[in-house]
Image (tube, rainbow, N blue to C red):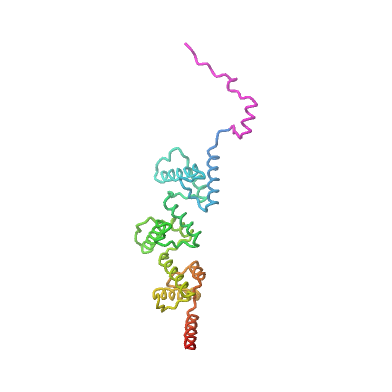
Amino acid sequence: MKTKSKTTKANRKLSQDRIKRLEEIGFTWHSVNKDTAFEKRCSELIRFKEEFGHCKVPYTYPANPSLGHWCSSLRIVRNKIQKGKKPGTITLSQDRIDRLDEIGFDWHTYDKIFETRCRELIAFKEEFGHCDVPTKYTANRTLGTWCNHVRTAYKSIQKGVKPTANLTQDRMARLEEIGFNWRANAGAFDMKILELKAFKEDHGHCNIPARCSSNPSLGMWCSNLRSAHNKIQMGVKPTRHLPQHRIDQLNEIGFKWCQKNLSTRRKGIKSLSEANK
C-alpha cells in the first residue's frame, strides 16, 4: 500500500532570492488584518467625500466599483443588525459604526434614480446659474417633470399630508444643498423672461409699465416683480418669491426696478410727442 509522501522542509523553503523578490514588489509576510482592510476602505470613502462633498457612493461607482459594493454591503448588514438578524460574514462592530458615522457615512439605501436627477440638476445649475428647471424643459423633460413632482411632494409635507413621492428629510437636505428652490414656478418665470426679451427686441428696452396694452399679463408680472423687489430692499418679506439669481437675471436683461423712473420716462415721451406736433 502506497503512503503519501510527506512534504519535506526543503520543499517549503524559500530561497533568499525569492524572499528578496517578493519584498521588492511589496509582499507582506503577515496575514491581512481585517482592521487594516477596513481602514483602507475608510480612507477611500474619505477621498470620495473630499471630491463630491458627501459619502453616498453609488453601487456602480465606475472609479472604484469595489467601494460602491462595500458601502452597499455595510448598509445591508446594519439593517439586519437593527432588525435583530445575523449580519452574515461582514463584521460590523459598534466601533466600526462609530468610525463610519464620524466620516459621515450615509446608512440609508442609495437611490440611484434620485442621485441621477441630482447630478442632472447640478449640471443644469452649472449651465444656467440656478436650479429652476422649467416643467417643459425640452433638453431633459424627465428632469423638469421630476422637479415639479418634488415641489408637489414638499407642499404636501408642509400641509401635513402624506406626499405621493418619497421625499425624506435627507433628500430635502440634499436638494437644498444643491440650491433647489421649493417655491419656484420655473416654467412660468422662464416664459415671462422670453416675453420680456421679445419686448426688448421690439421696443429697444424692457421698461414695461404695469398697464402694458400690447401684453397686459407681462405688464402685471413686471409690476409684481417690482413690488417684491421693493419689499426686499426695505427688509420686508415679499409675497412673491424673488431669489437673488432671478434678480441678477433680470438685471442682465436691463429690467427697470423703479416705477417712478418709468412714470417720468412716459411723461417725458408724452411731452416730447406734444412738442413735435
Closer-to-camera residue (83/276): 276
Q: Residue 114 at what x, y percent from top left?
A: 42, 53
Closer-to-camera residue (128/241): 128
Q: How many marks?
A: 0
> Along the horizontal axis of the image, is 171 left or right of 31?
left
Q: Is residue 17 above or below residue 99?
A: above
Q: What segment is highlighted magenta in the picture? A: 1-29
> Along the horizontal axis of the image, is 191 left or right of 19?
left
Q: Residue at x 34, y 57 (%)?
A: 164
Q: Is residue 93 above or below residue 255?
A: above
Corner quadrant of residue 118 = bottom left
Q: Residue at x 54, y 40 (%)?
A: 37
Q: Residue 157 at what x, y percent from top left?
A: 38, 61
Q: Residue 33 at what x, y percent from top left?
A: 55, 37
As for residue 4 lying within the magenta part, the answer is yes
* Residue farthest top in this picture: 1
Closer-to-camera residue (169/223): 223
Q: Is residue 83 above or below residue 156?
A: above
Q: Residue 71 at what x, y percent from top left?
A: 47, 45
Closer-to-camera residue (253/48): 253
Corner quadrant of residue 149 = bottom left
As for residue 16 lying within the magenta part, the answer is yes
Q: Residue at x 50, y 16 (%)?
A: 4
